[in-house]
Amino acid sequence: MEKAALKLNYCINFVDILFKKKNTLNGILVLKQLSTVNTFNKDISMLTSKAVSQT
């Protein structure tokens, strides 16, 4: 359960950092690497569900 919570927290932090950096060059490069917003959302959903399913 703790591992899953840590993974979920990591995902949330990653998203938070990503959007805080979106105005910086690094953030723009990261956003460009995500082919589409839908793909990104699907990846986050998958990571979240994996983390939750391990509880």
Image (cartoon, helix red, strand yellow):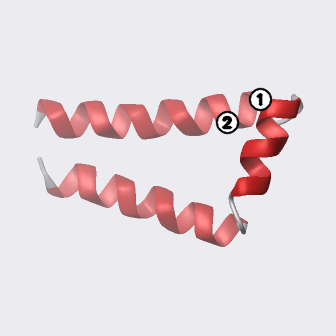
Q: Can you say whether 26 is above or below 50 in the image? A: above
Q: Can you say whether 28 is above or below 41 in the image? A: above
Locate residue 25: give its quadrant: top right
- Image position of 54 (left or right of 18): left
> Mark 1 highlights which residue?
21
Residue 16 percent location from the top left of the image: 61, 32
**Element on which disc 2 rests:** helix
- Image position of 18 (left or right of 15): right
Task: Compare residues 25 and 3 and report the one nearer the observer.
Answer: 25
Report the residue at 68% width, 59% height from top: 34
Locate residue 28: give its quadrant: top right
- Image position of 19 (left or right of 40): right
Find residue 18 and name its label: 2
Residue 35 percent location from the top left of the image: 71, 67
Neighbor class of circle 2 (other Cα within 10 Å; few <14, some 14-19, many 20+) is some
Report the residue at 65% width, 71% height from top: 38
Report the residue at 72% width, 44% height from top: 30
Residue 49 percent location from the top left of the image: 30, 60
Neighbor class of circle 1 (other Cα within 10 Å; few <14, some 14-19, many 20+) is some
Residue 20 percent location from the top left of the image: 74, 28
**Element on which disc 1 rests:** loop
- Image position of 42 (left or right of 50): right
Whether label 1 touches label 2, CB < 8 Å: yes
Which amino acid, by three-letter code, is at mark 1?
Lys
Which amino acid, by three-letter code, is at mark 2?
Leu
